[in-house]
Image: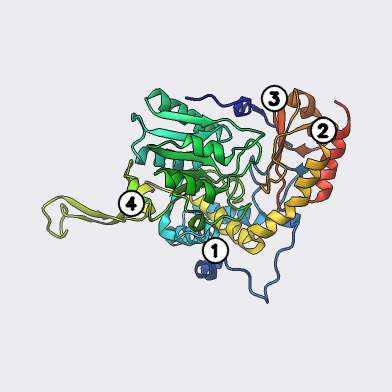
Amino acid sequence: MSAPDNLSRRRFISVAGVAPLSFGLLDHLADQAFEAPSSDTEAVRLPCPGLFSVKGTYLNAAYTHPMSRASAEAVKEYLDFRQANGNSRPDFRTGWDEVKKMYAGLINADPGEIAWIPGTMAGENMIVNGLGIPGSKARIVTDALHFDGSLYMYSELARQGADVHVITPRNNRIWPDQIEAAITPGTRLVAVSLVSMVNGFTHDLKSLCEIAHSRGALVYADIVQAVGAVLLDVHDSKVDFCAASSFKWLMGDFGAGFLYVSKESMHHVKRAQYGYRQLADSVSHMLPFDPPGGEPYTYSQTNDAAGHFEVGSLGNEAVATLGKSLELIRELGPAAITEHRKPMIRLLQSRLPSMGFLPLTPEDSSSPIVSFAYRDAGKKLAGKLADAKINIQLYDNRFRISPSVYNSISDIEKLIDLLSVKH
């Protein structure tokens, strides 16, 4: 396995500074998906700190995005139901399906191409296992800006015999010629982070898919640092698979995420695990009054993404948060969210290099992440940031800043003022 460069070192220092699922209000959204709000609806204006209960100056949404007040209230309503142990059981499945439909609209997918999953890495494992890669000699192409957990997985697959090639960044990005050179005949899978958690570098997903597909390879994209923060159209890009947890830019919570599998690529992936959520129906033939049958139990499966990848119970609490957060993202719009943060990212890129911080993010990046290298960043900056109640992501020798919809230029100026003091 080709070795990634120093940027793959991810050890970091954390700087801390009733309808039970609240789905009733989403009824009208289920059909509208992510269409623009009507003209008589006043759009939420950015920044919108009043919708959140953020303490201090929080510039670390790429680590964990704060939950909105509305999402937190939805969780409280759900917990009230669970605590009361009510006599009636809510129609959870309807709520799950509505939220799935909203997410599908966000990325321009069909709901049948979406499966609920516990998190991003679970989704990537499902694809790798469904393609039969573990224990094979299949060629896999990835890059050192991919998620570190994924790089660990592919390292282990390489130990089992897979031909894994890791592209090393050049000038803080992965270039098309590097991708073309790496995808040799027989490559089974190309796996990348659409937006890198390391430095915010963003792949041209459509171009990457064109290159890979022309050579017979499938493409998996980790979109956890992209979806909700940037415009994303999976049908236009022709990506085969992508996955995301919901606790980052989807503004949800831990324990719930989504796996997208295109209808055209579904046949490539076999069921690698099994559970009741894959069933279209099931019938018992062994109890009194059951219909007769040759077997004690018969069933049929659904053939959509859920029928391939969903297994067991979902975290209803996390689904409740998404009902509200996806509604908020719909009202704001990924394009407006992108435009809102651009001045903040540009200000950081224009000011910090002259202060001795080495830029790691390409200048033309439109992602929500900007990173800088700085020797002993964790040791030198942790205390000052904590005292000022400013939260960014610190690593040993670099730091990452990721503003969101509740931030403004004044937050960035506050951080710059603190960093301008010699350390």
Residue on which the image places disc 2: 387
- The answer, for residue 115, to whether it is visible in the render is yes
Residue found at x 59% / y 53%: 76
Q: Nearer the viewer, mark 3 or mark 2?
A: 3
Front in this rendered view, residue 232 or 379: 232
The CA span between labels 3 and 2 is 19 Å
Q: Is residue 184 above or below residue 308?
A: above
Q: Nearer the viewer, mark 1 or mark 4?
A: 4
Task: Give neighbour class at mark 2: few <14, some 14-19, many 20+ (Cα, 10 Å).
Answer: few
- Residue type (three-letter) at the residue carrying disc 1: Val
Q: How many marks?
A: 4
Are dots 3 and 2 in contact, CB under 8 Å? Answer: no
| Local secondary structure at mark 4 | helix
Q: Earlier in the sequence, mark 1 or mark 4?
A: 1
Precedes in sequence: disc 4 or disc 2: 4
Query: Disc 4 to disc 2, how far (Cα)?
Result: 51 Å
Question: What residue type is disc 3 on?
Answer: Asp
- Which residue is painted at 38% across and 54% down in the image? 264
- Circle nearer the N terminus (3, 4): 4
Checking the image for residue 278, the label placed there is: 4
Q: Quick one: SS at disc 2?
A: helix
Residue in the picture at 63% in, 25% down: 6
Residue at label 3?
A: 396
Quarter that holds the C terminus: top right
| Residue at 78% in and 46% down | 346
Hey, what amino acid is under mark 2?
Asp
Residue 352, position in %: x, y?
81, 36
Real-space Cα separation, disc 1 to disc 2, in angstroms: 42 Å
Residue tagged 1 = 18
Q: Is residue 243 visible?
A: no
